[in-house]
Amino acid sequence: MLGIYFSGTGNTRYCVEKFVKEDNIDNKAISIEDPNVLKEMQESDIIAIGYPVYYSNIPTILREFIVKNQLVFKGKSVFVIATMAMFSGDGAGYLARILSGYGANIIGGLHITMPDCICDEKVLKRSIEANSRLVKKGEAKINKAVEQFKKCQPTKEGLGLLSHILGLMIQRIWFYHKTKEYSNKIKIDQEKCIGCGICVNLCPMKNLSMDQKVAVQNNQCTLCYRCVSNCPRQAITLLGNKIYEQCKIEKYI
């Protein structure tokens, strides 16, 4: 089994790596940003694909990757892993339906609650201790899911009709267009920005660039919060206007 993922602050990477390694220590997990990902996918019959859920939707970067490389998924057995801060509904199911349309055989789904990555909204913040407990619960859920997978009884979270209805009616129908609007909402405090270029180098969408020694955005944000979490001056915000915590999985494990 090959694990592939998109991960902004490390949650999804951590979960996919743990899932495939628990199945077999020799299994690989690789980011969709890795230049070797397509070669690895072509050589694997079973793929576990993971991503963070944004308003019961999938990240723009992952959607574009799948559309561009849809033929690679044809005939593959795919297990979908969706990570989230709260509720998703059909987080795994949404991607599963897309991949099924491209000829993939969906063999299972798993929803894992992890520490949120939204650095600039206080209402979502938990203590480091609470987030560590959340990660432990996630690890236990992954272990159980792998046991089921090995018994040929994979979990199917988010794949049913009820999950589809919940995801559509409670979140996606209300927030679908919001995810598009947020693509140009990054705010960079030019007084704080020191022109280090860390955000430019880390951005998976190539949405950030340097202009007269300060970072500027180009309206292609995928909402991953990677730049916000790694800015040494806390100069970048997205949904809110103040940084309450810079989120990285390494803080909680």
Image: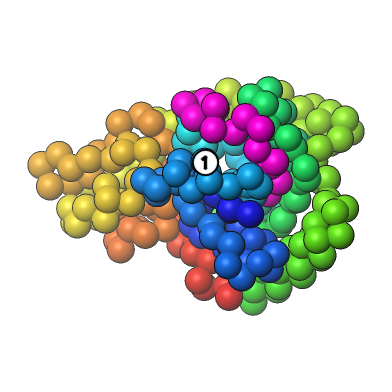
> Horizontal placement of 233 versus 229: left or right?
left
- From this viewpoint, is residue 77 visible? yes
Question: Could you tell me residue 55's position as x and y percent?
Answer: 65, 37
> Horizontal placement of 35 versus 164: left or right?
left
- From this viewpoint, is residue 124 visible? no
- Relative to 60, say whether 157 is above or below: below
Question: Could you tell me residue 28's position as x and y percent?
Answer: 54, 60
- Relative to 195, say whether 42 is above or below: above
Hey, which quadrant is residue 56 in on the image? top right
Residue indicated by mark 1: 42
Residue for point 74% across, 37% down: 106
Q: Judge the density around disc 1: few (<14), some (14-19), many (≥20) Cα neighbours within 10 Å.
A: few
**Of residues 189 and 148, the one drawn nearer to the viewer in this rendering:** 148
Hey, which quadrant is residue 127 in on the image? bottom right
The kind of secondary structure element at disc 1 is helix
> Horizontal placement of 59 versus 91: left or right?
left
> Horizontal placement of 44 versus 229: left or right?
right
Question: Could you tell me residue 139's position as x and y percent?
Answer: 71, 68
**Does the magenta-highlighted stretch encompass residue 73?**
yes
**Does the magenta-highlighted stretch encompass residue 124?**
no
Which range is magenta?
66-81
Question: Could you tell me residue 205's position as x and y percent?
Answer: 37, 38
- Relative to 212, say whether 149 is above or below: below
- Relative to 56, say whether 201 is above or below: below
Residue for point 47% across, 26% down: 68
**Of residues 61 and 235, the one drawn nearer to the viewer in this rendering:** 61
- What amino acid is found at the position of numbered circle 1 in the picture? Gln
**Of residues 188 and 209, the one drawn nearer to the viewer in this rendering:** 209
